[in-house]
Structure formats: C-alpha cells, structure tokens
Image: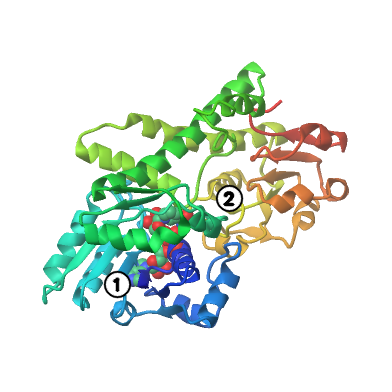
Amino acid sequence: MEISVIGTGYVGLVTGVCFAELGNQVTCIDNDVKKISALKKMIIPIYEPGLEELVKNNVKKKRLKFNTSIKDGIKDSKVVFIAVGTPSRPNGEADLTYVENVARGIAKHLSGYKLIVEKSTVPVETGKWIEHTIKINNKKKVPFDVASNPEFLREGSAISDFMHPDRIVIGVQSKRAEGLLTELYRPLKAPIVVTDINSAELIKHASNSFLATKISFINAVSQVCELVGADISKVAEGMGMDKRIGRQFLDAGIGFGGSCFPKDVDAFIHLSEKSGYDFSLLREVRRVNERQKGYFVKLIEKKLWILKDKTIGILGLAFKPGTDDMRNAPAIDIIKMLQQEGARIKAFDPQAMEKAKEFLTEIKFCKDAYEVARDSDCLVILTDWNEFKEIDFKRIKKLIGQPIIFDGRNMYNRAAIEKLGFQYFCIGRK
Ligand code: NAD
C-alpha cells in the first residue's frame, strides 16, 4: 500500500520504517528541513536500537522516501498518518497546533480518497476536529475518512514493540477505513480492537495514565518500606506474581519522565476536568512523582551533608535506557536541584549527552563512568543503562573521592557493592 507519515520523530520514523519493512511504499514527511536532509543522507536524527539499519535497508529497497512537502508526500498515498508532537501547554492541556496545521495542509492537497489516521496521542474529540478542519479546507469536496490509531511503542524497544504489539487499536467511523487499517496491520498478526474514534483516543490516555499510576503507587509503597524497614524489591516481587497485578511497572525509583507519561497524565487530568470530572487520583499520581525526585536529592544531601562545592558524578541522563530522549527526564530536575545547592556536576550517558545540552548547563560531560568517578564525592545513578551493570567498581573505588553510591534505579546488589567498600543508598530496599 502507498502510505505517508507526517511527523518524522520517534513515532513517525519508526512507524514509517516498520510499514516499509512490511512491504508498503512509505513517504515520511517532516517540516524540519534539517531532519529530512539528514535522513536523505542516511543520518538518523534519533537513537533507537536497530533503527539505522532498518532505514538504510528500506531506502535501498526503494520502499522508504523522505519529503518536506505535504503536497508531494501525500500525492499517491491512500493512508496518511499524523504523527506530529502534541506537547503540553502551561495549563497541562495538549497543544494541538501541529495537528491542526497538518490537517489543514492535508485538506489543501487532497486528490482522490484518503484515510487520515491520527497516530499522535490526542485528547478525546480530536478526531472530530481533524474531520471538521479537513472538511472546511477541502474546497474540491474530495472524499476522505478520519480514523484514530494510537501508538503504544516504547522508546528503546520501539521497533520490536511496533512489530509485536500486544494489540492494535483502531477507532473508525466507516467500514472502508476499518478495511484499510485491518489490511495494513494484517501482517503483524496481532489482536485488533475496533472501536469508535472517541474510545480509541481514550484508550491511549487511559493506558498511559494507568501505567503512570502503577509507578507512583510502587514509589509511594517504597517510601513506606523505608519507614518500616521493609524491602520494596521483595514487596514488588510478591505483588507482581499475582497475575491480576503483574510485575511490570512495579520498579521503585526516581519516578517517571519522558515525552509521554507526564504530558499524557496532565492532558487526561485537563480533559476530564473540562468534561466535568475531577480526576484527583491522577493529580496525586503527579504529586507522588514530583516528590520522589525531591526525596532522592534530600537523601544525597543527608549523606553528603553540605552540597556546596561537592562534586557529584552522575551516571545516566536519558529518561530511560535505550534512548537519547531527554524530554522530561528526571535527571534534569534532579541535576538542577543539586546545582541549586551549589554542587558541581560531572556526567556520562551512553547516548543522551548531546541532547542533554539543550536542557542542562554547567555540566562537565565525561567519556565514561570512570572519568565521572575520578575525584567525585559520590556516584549517582539516574538511568539504568545495561552497560552500567558491567562497570568495574574496583576501578571506580580507586578513582572516586568518597566511595558512596546513590542508586536511583535500584540496579545494583547491595551486598556486592558494599563488599567492595562503598556506602550504598537506593530506594526502599534493604
Ligand atoms: P517528536 O517530537 O519526536 O516528532 C514529531 C515530529 O513532527 C517532529 O520531527 C516535528 O518536526 C514534526 N512536525 C511538527 N509539525 C509538523 C508539520 N506541520 N508538518 C510536518 N512535520 C511536523 O515526537 P514523538 O515522540 O514522535 O511523538 C509524536 C506523537 O506520538 C505525540 O503525540 C506523542 O505523544 C505520541 N507518542 C509518542 C511515543 C514516544 O515514545 N515518543 C509513544 C507513543 C505515542
């Protein structure tokens, strides 16, 4: 099938390349000229495992193209996905400016029937607004359909998530739209939930908010563990073996971040309020999440005493391992709080240091964990990158100023670390 994807970011590029890999003819469109010219030269603008190879392979096989123009990019496409950003406005509401711009752009260049699919995460009723926008700008009255197809991939495992989804959700209002999307997704052999557009939009917001709630719940329990001397890793293990609960998203730490959970929880709170429901449960989810970062900084302060002029060595900046995405990474707030107390920051992240420069200043970026450790007053783990499990802590011990580790991701075995002569502090674990 000929398809186009408008918005070539973490979701759009992965969606485009995966549909190409499945044998479709795909055009990825973005109004960021630099991004598209880089992609045309095979320079991949984001880090996502396996992405570069897949892009190169599909461009070589002439199944994947890049374009900056909506007009040219959608010309031959039957299905057009919208995958532009939907950031938060200051009041928490989703900013749908990019979605509206794209809808207008599509309407102006409609030639023959097209199915326009919103893949961006959007509040309920956005589908209706997209339809309305296209209708009023579609002077030639070309037939079209609008559908919702929220994306559930996770950065760091985006390709595998796209290719092996637990389910595919499609919100449609015509059999024609249902048929096209079902055909497109058939090769994935995944269960498809077909529903109306409003319900599809709500499934995405409700899913992300539920997962965020799970994280805040376990973080709140970790605080109780600290107070009563229980061990959160055992509590999570015992809870997670219950199939009704499940073990995933029960890892206590410094809280959730990233480009989705914080903004999607905020947007869901806002949407509910606007519709007449006070979703106070989700407000508490946000509060617990914010508190968790402050709690971690206080823990560091309690153990180091004065932070002014101390050197804090940070390992991990990205909001999670496997990505270079720094949007709403807990590391940003934590590092700013430490800097406010007068601490000096050295940091290393395997992928996110370039992007971190957009959010953080006055940091000495280092080439590896050992350079971070040299003469630092402690090591602070903020992202649980797999390679941090391979660190030679005997070597670290020789380099570090004070052998103290604050593990915000509960990734190390306390006994093993303490045996090497470190003091080890983590979240809610004995
Ligand atoms: P992103 O910022 O990485 O990419 C968005 C792209 O859209 C950018 O490259 C931008 O230049 C482009 N764009 C903006 N306006 C445009 C226009 N008028 N014409 C063409 N291109 C335009 O964002 P993302 O992380 O890919 O997220 C996109 C959407 O998918 C959001 O709604 C997000 O909530 C949702 N989502 C994200 C993830 C994730 O893990 N990142 C997962 C599921 C859903």
Q: Quadrant of residue 144?
A: bottom left
Residue 26, quarter of picture: bottom left
Mark in front: 2 vs 1: 1
Quadrant containing the N terminus is: bottom left
Can residue 38 be seen at all in this image of the molecule?
no
Q: Position of residue 312 (x, y in %)?
A: 70, 47
> Which residue is farthest top?
228
Is 324 situated above or below 230?
below
Q: Are marks 2 and 1 in contact (CB under 8 Å)?
A: no
Q: Which mark is residue 329?
A: none
> Which residue corresponds to mark 1?
78
Q: Is residue 414 left or right of residue 220?
A: right
Q: For the residue labelled by badge 1, is the local secondary structure a helix, a strand or a loop?
A: loop
Q: Which residue is pictured at 22% across the width and 40% down the height? A: 274
First along the sequence among labels 2 and 1: 1
Q: Does residue 364 sit above or below 418 in this rendering? A: below
* Amino acid beneath label 2: Lys
Residue 36 in picture, x, y percent from top left:
45, 78
Residue at image position (67%, 41%) is: 307
> Helix or strand or loop: what does disc 2 sit on?
loop
Q: Position of residue 260 (x, y in %)?
A: 44, 50
- Image quadrant holding the C terminus, namely top right
> Label 2 crowding class (10 Å Cα cut-off): few <14, some 14-19, many 20+?
many
In this figure, which residue is indicated by the disc labeled 2? 320
Q: Quadrant of residue 46?
A: bottom right
Q: Nearer the viewer, residue 300 or 167?
A: 167
Q: Which amino acid, by three-letter code, is at mark 1?
A: Lys
309 to 133, vertically: above or below? above
Is residue 110 among what the camera can see?
yes
Is the CB of the residue bearing disc 1 within 8 angstroms of ligand 1? no
Q: Between 287 and 257, which is closer to the camera in this rendering? A: 257
